Amino acid sequence: DLPGADKVAAPFAAAAIAMLTNNGALARPSALRAAAAFDAAAITGWALEAQLIVAQCDVLARRWPQAGQAFEAILARASGLPDIAAKCQTGLGLLQLGRGLRAQARASLQQAVENIEAQRAALPGDEFRMSYGADKEVAHLALVRMALDDGDGGAAVRLMACMEQARA
């Protein structure tokens, strides 16, 4: 048991639950408290997860520059944490895409997909690999959308085939 674990876990749980309903106004203050508490306890992975919630709240509130800065800062600290890196790269890619920065968006989203696929490949057993990607298709689908927008149906089909292969 960690001393004061309830002071760390409670705000994170409140933030995560609020995000299930896209309630960024409720989630953000709790996530900020959780991130500070996890950082103070030197629990980096969870601190970054809490900071991701803050960045996602900024996206919901249309605070694009703050969200982008947050994703960049988290990504800089996410060494050895490929799931967190993939979430940041996906968030950055979607923000870049929204700003019309297609080349940067494509690069960020491809990095996210590479992280996701590397994690999936390292899992033992087909059941684990199949279930791993269930919540990680956003980056893939954004790349499919970009290919379709570019009039490259062949690339879109190849991306969908890769997604299907990852499910199998």
Image: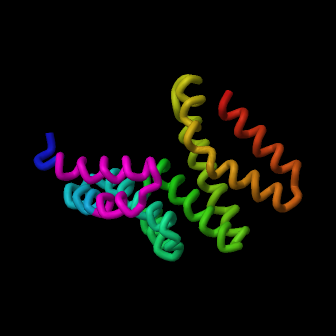
Total numbered badges shown on the rendered structure: 0
The colouring scheme, among rainbow, by chain, secondary structure or one colour, is rainbow
* Left or right of residue 71: residue 116: right
Q: Seen from this angle, which residue lies furthest left?
A: 3
Residue drawn where x is 42% and y is 57% of the image: 23
Image height check: is 23 above or below 67? above
* Residue drawn at x 29%, y 58% as measured from the top left: 30
Whole-percent x, y for residue 24 in the image:
42, 60
Considering depth in this image, is 30 or 167 the residue closer to the camera? 30
Check the image and report above or below for 14 versus 166.
below
27 or 141, nearer to the observer: 27
Secondary structure that dominates the magenta span: helix
Residue at the image position 68 percent from the left and 27 percent from the top: 168
- Report whether 48 appears left or right of 97: left
Evaluate whether residue 77 shows in this view: no
Height in image: 147 above or below 134? below
Which residue does the image show at 30% across and 50% down from the upper left?
Answer: 14
Q: With 117 as the anchor, is 74 left or right in this view?
A: left
| Residue 33 counted in the magenta span | no
Q: Is residue 25 magenta?
A: yes
Residue span colored magenta: 6-32
